């Protein structure tokens, strides 16, 4: 009897403590800005129920027409410590470098991140979230390694290849890739193409460089880029591609098997959100389940189950969303706020338990190397779309190898100019390489006045 | 002498003019905030070192350096800016000349009392229709029409045997410029026609009747009566078209992004790429906007001068009879 009484009393005291604490503790208010409702959805579903002490004000501005970056720039430019300014804000691949190089974003160690914690992230995503001095300012909750996706039936029909390992040997580097493209053309009488267009290769090939576009404030044209031009020119001139652009009608036609295209270079999100919804006519309709897509593909002669993943010639990354903190507000945060911010960012980028759970729920490829390892140890994720192949295993090796230190804040502009002034005119035989390079340099110098072009 | 009672002369008149001011106020307030202020801000920015968003509000005035660059043949932006102006003029010319010609012919047919065209409403609506679709949509439409290597036009010319291989239209200077001119022409012809019809309808019908009685041919009526009398409308049309043509942005931006090799890059696109790509050179973009503003003013004045001063105001003399 005494025991029971003691336990009841103890339980009451415990409850009393808890309720007393939550009644006394003031709510921690955070402003979180993003450009989609993805983070808000994750926080509201998985995080807020366990953290009643938080009160989060979400603001979402779309990236269309630079609305998000304009809002960030004008807010921070006017008064970064104002009540409206964000505490945490997200950055996407196109502009993450710009902001981690700026004074807007703060060192994550200021809110309590340790080197040990930061080392759990995939190096490529961590590198992109660092500034030139190596200060970690952004962490991504996904990582977006890219691989080569190919159609097993076409590989077998024209190249006699039956396993991904064999196919990887055929595309182990860019010379082998080009050779295979020739072999494919000969074997299929020009009916089957290696890729839709040479533009497909760029996202992967840029990771082949040994240095990024801008080094010490100077424009650098890496030698690998000149090899890239020769590769693209041969692909174009020898009719090894369909000469179509990415995201065009002809690009999707190859995905659903209407045209015979062997390879696509796509990252993690490309598998679920680009390739699968286009593996058959009408597969992109809303609300279709995995079974619906498979049935549709079987009925219309689509490509469900025909795709396989290999590492391809180079490990690369394409995309990602980073979480960063407002540098100007660090001084205004008390310890509890700092701890809350640390916990929130940690949970969504590095917390192994949560990431494993989230990966199972969503199929997303997460940003923590440790969590990915656990998922693989748990038996991985055999994928019927890939004929039972485990996409997590392939993505994990690409994620571990890609070199994120090549990215610079001017990539968006310079990549576009490189394509317009060098790749397109040169591969189509309109200009000589020297002239193309000269035009490119002039264009870069006119567009970016803050770097040196020689 | 009797004087009118004071009450009557002091009759309190109700002034309606204040309502007028209230009604126009929203426009002027919006204009001041969203037009006039940005214009002054642009003028100011063109004199500063505002490169990058950080410097939009915290910059310092450096004088006319940006303008010097635009006019210095050795600078990087010189070739790009004046090249873009040349492209814009070429595209505008091949859009405007056929547009004005066709609009005038159609307008004179629709207003000709001797022709009495049937189903006029249908034709007017059809010709005006492209103007109500947004330019971006039409740009996308033509992009898919002329897509390479597979698109409706390429499939068509190969099926009927005009060509053996698909043509890459947007890598050809002539095709790219031609298509942009064509779209502008196709979109704005109906609009110009409607304005011309309005102008011609405003001419006193007795003049046409007199011409008919005197035995004028249709051609004579057009050249000797219609054209001289719609000169003010022509001036209006030329001026608005010049402003629209020189600030052309959406169609080239949607369709070609200035390619191939900057031959369809317009001044407005030059300003956009300076201001909103790369290092965000707001100063240079503003300076180019100011120069463009100057060019448009000079162009408009030339049009006014050329069209108004050749003969001593025939329009006013004739209209005086009304």
Image (tube, coloured by chain):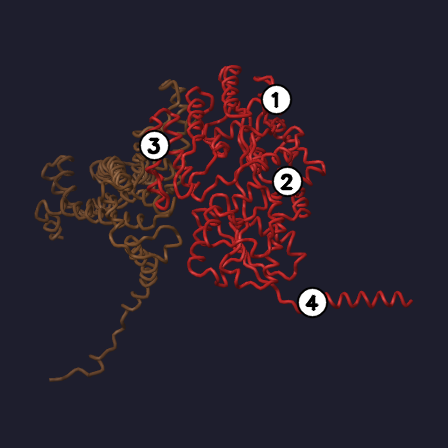
Chain colours: A red, B brown
Rendered residue at 62%/55% (across/down): A343
Image location (x, y in percent) of residue A356: 67, 44
Q: Which chain carries label 2?
A: A
Which residue: 86% across, 67% down? A6
For this rendering, which residue is in front, A11 or A282? A11
Q: Which quarter of the picture shows residue A218?
A: top left
Mark 1 vs mark 2: in front: 1
Neighbour tally class for label 2: few under 14, some 14-19, many 20 plus, Cα within 10 Å: some
Q: How far apart are marks 2 and 4 (CA)?
A: 38 Å
Report the residue marked by disc 1.
A166
Disc 1 sits on a residue from what chain? A
**Residues under labels 2 and 3: Cα distance?**
42 Å
Q: Could you tell me which secondary element the residue under label 1 belongs to?
A: helix
Whole-Å distance between the Cαs marked 3 and 4?
Answer: 67 Å
Q: Can residue B290 be seen in this view?
A: yes
Sequence order check: which comes first, mark 2 or mark 4?
A: 4
Indicate the position of residue A67 as horizontal and vertical percent values.
44, 50
Assign a secondary structure to mark 4.
Answer: helix
Q: Do the residues labelled 2 and 3 touch (CB within 8 Å)?
A: no
For marks 1 and 2, the one nearer the N-term is: 1
Q: Name the residue under label 2.
A: A363
Query: Residue A231 has which mark?
Result: none
For discs 3 and 1, the disc positioned in front in the rendered view: 1
Residues flagged by tags 1 and 4 on a common chain: yes
Q: Name the residue under label 4.
A: A21
Spatial CA distance of label 1 from label 4 is: 62 Å
Quadrant location of the C terminus of chain A? top left
Instruction: Give the residue number, with chain letter if any, for mark 3.
Output: B260
Number of other residues with Cα within 10 Å of mark 4, as a class: few under 14, some 14 to 19, many 20 or more:
few
Residues tagged 3 and 4 counted as in contact (Cβ below 8 A): no
């Amino acid at each position: 009897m005494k025991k029971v009484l003691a336990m009841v009393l103890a339980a009451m005291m415990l409850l009393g403590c808890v309720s007393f604490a939550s009644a006394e503790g003031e709510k921690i208010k955070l402003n979180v800005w993003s450009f989609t409702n993805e983070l808000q959805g994750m926080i509201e579903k998985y995080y807020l129920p366990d953290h009643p002490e938080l009160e989060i004000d979400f603001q979402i501005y779309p990236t269309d027409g630079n609305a998000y970056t304009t809002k960030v720039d004008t807010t921070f430019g006017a008064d970064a410590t104002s009540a409206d300014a964000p505490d945490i804000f997200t950055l996407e691949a196109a502009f993450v470098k710009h902001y981690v190089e700026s004074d807007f974003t703060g060192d994550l160690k200021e809110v309590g991140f340790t080197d040990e914690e930061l080392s759990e992230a995939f190096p490529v995503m961590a590198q992109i979230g660092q500034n030139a001095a190596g200060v970690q300012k952004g962490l991504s909750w996904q990582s977006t390694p890219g691989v080569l996706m190919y159609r097993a039936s076409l590989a077998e029909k024209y190249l006699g290849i039956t396993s991904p390992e064999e196919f990887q040997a055929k595309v182990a580097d860019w010379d082998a890739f080009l050779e295979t493209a020739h072999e494919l053309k000969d074997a299929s009488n020009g009916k089957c193409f290696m890729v839709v267009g040479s533009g497909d290769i760029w996202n992967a090939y840029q990771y082949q460089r040994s240095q990024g576009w801008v080094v010490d404030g100077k424009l650098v044209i890496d030698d690998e880029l000149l090899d890239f031009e020769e590769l693209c020119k041969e692909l174009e001139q020898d009719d090894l591609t369909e000469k179509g652009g990415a995201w065009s009608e002809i690009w999707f036609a190859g995905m659903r098997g209407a045209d015979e295209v062997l390879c696509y270079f796509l990252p993690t999100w490309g598998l679920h959100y680009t390739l699968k919804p286009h593996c058959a006519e009408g597969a992109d309709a809303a609300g279709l389940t995995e079974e619906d897509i498979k049935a549709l593909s079987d009925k219309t002669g689509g490509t469900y189950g025909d795709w396989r993943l290999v590492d391809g010639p180079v490990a690369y990354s394409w995309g990602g969303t980073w979480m960063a903190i407002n540098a100007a507000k660090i001084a205004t945060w008390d310890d509890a706020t700092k701890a809350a911010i640390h916990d929130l960012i940690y949970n969504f980028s590095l917390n192994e338990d949560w990431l494993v759970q989230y990966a199972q729920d969503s199929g997303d490829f997460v940003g923590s190397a440790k969590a990915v390892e656990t998922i693989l140890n748990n038996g991985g994720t055999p994928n019927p779309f890939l004929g039972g192949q485990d996409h997590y295993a392939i993505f994990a090796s690409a994620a571990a190898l890609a070199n994120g230190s090549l990215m610079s804040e001017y990539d968006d502009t310079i990549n576009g100019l490189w394509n317009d002034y060098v790749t397109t005119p040169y591969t189509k035989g309109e200009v000589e390489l020297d002239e193309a390079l000269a035009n490119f340099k002039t264009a870069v110098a006119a567009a970016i006045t803050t770097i040196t072009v020689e | 002498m009797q004087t009118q009672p004071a009450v009557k002369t002091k009759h309190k008149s109700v002034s309606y003019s204040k309502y007028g001011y209230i009604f126009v106020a929203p426009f002027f307030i919006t204009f001041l905030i969203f037009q006039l202020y940005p214009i002054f801000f642009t003028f100011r920015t063109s004199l500063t070192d505002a490169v990058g968003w950080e410097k939009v509000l915290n910059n310092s005035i450096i004088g006319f350096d940006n303008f010097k660059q635009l006019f210095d043949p050795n600078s990087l932006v010189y070739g790009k800016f004046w090249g873009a102006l040349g492209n814009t003029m070429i595209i505008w010319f091949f859009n405007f000349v056929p547009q004005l010609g066709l609009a005038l012919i159609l307008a004179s047919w629709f207003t000709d009392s001797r022709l009495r065209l049937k189903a006029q409403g249908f034709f007017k609506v059809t010709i005006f229709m492209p103007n109500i679709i947004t330019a971006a949509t039409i740009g996308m439409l033509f992009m898919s029409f002329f897509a390479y290597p597979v698109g409706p036009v390429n499939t068509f010319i190969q099926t009927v045997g005009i060509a053996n291989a698909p043509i890459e239209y947007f890598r050809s200077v002539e095709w790219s410029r031609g298509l942009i001119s064509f779209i502008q022409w196709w979109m704005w012809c109906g609009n110009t026609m409607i304005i011309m019809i309005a102008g011609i309808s405003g001419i006193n019908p007795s003049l046409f009747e007199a011409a008919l009685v005197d035995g004028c041919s249709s051609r004579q009526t057009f050249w000797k009566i219609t054209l001289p009398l719609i000169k003010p409308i022509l001036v209006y049309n030329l001026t608005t078209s010049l402003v629209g043509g020189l600030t052309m942005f959406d169609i080239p931006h949607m369709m070609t992004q200035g390619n191939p090799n900057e031959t369809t890059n317009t001044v407005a696109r030059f300003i956009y790429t300076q201001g909103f790509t790369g290092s965000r050179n707001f100063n240079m973009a503003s300076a180019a906007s100011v120069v463009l503003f100057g060019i448009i003013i000079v162009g408009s004045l030339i049009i006014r001068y050329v069209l108004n001063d050749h003969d001593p105001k025939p329009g006013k003399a004739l209209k005086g009879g009304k």
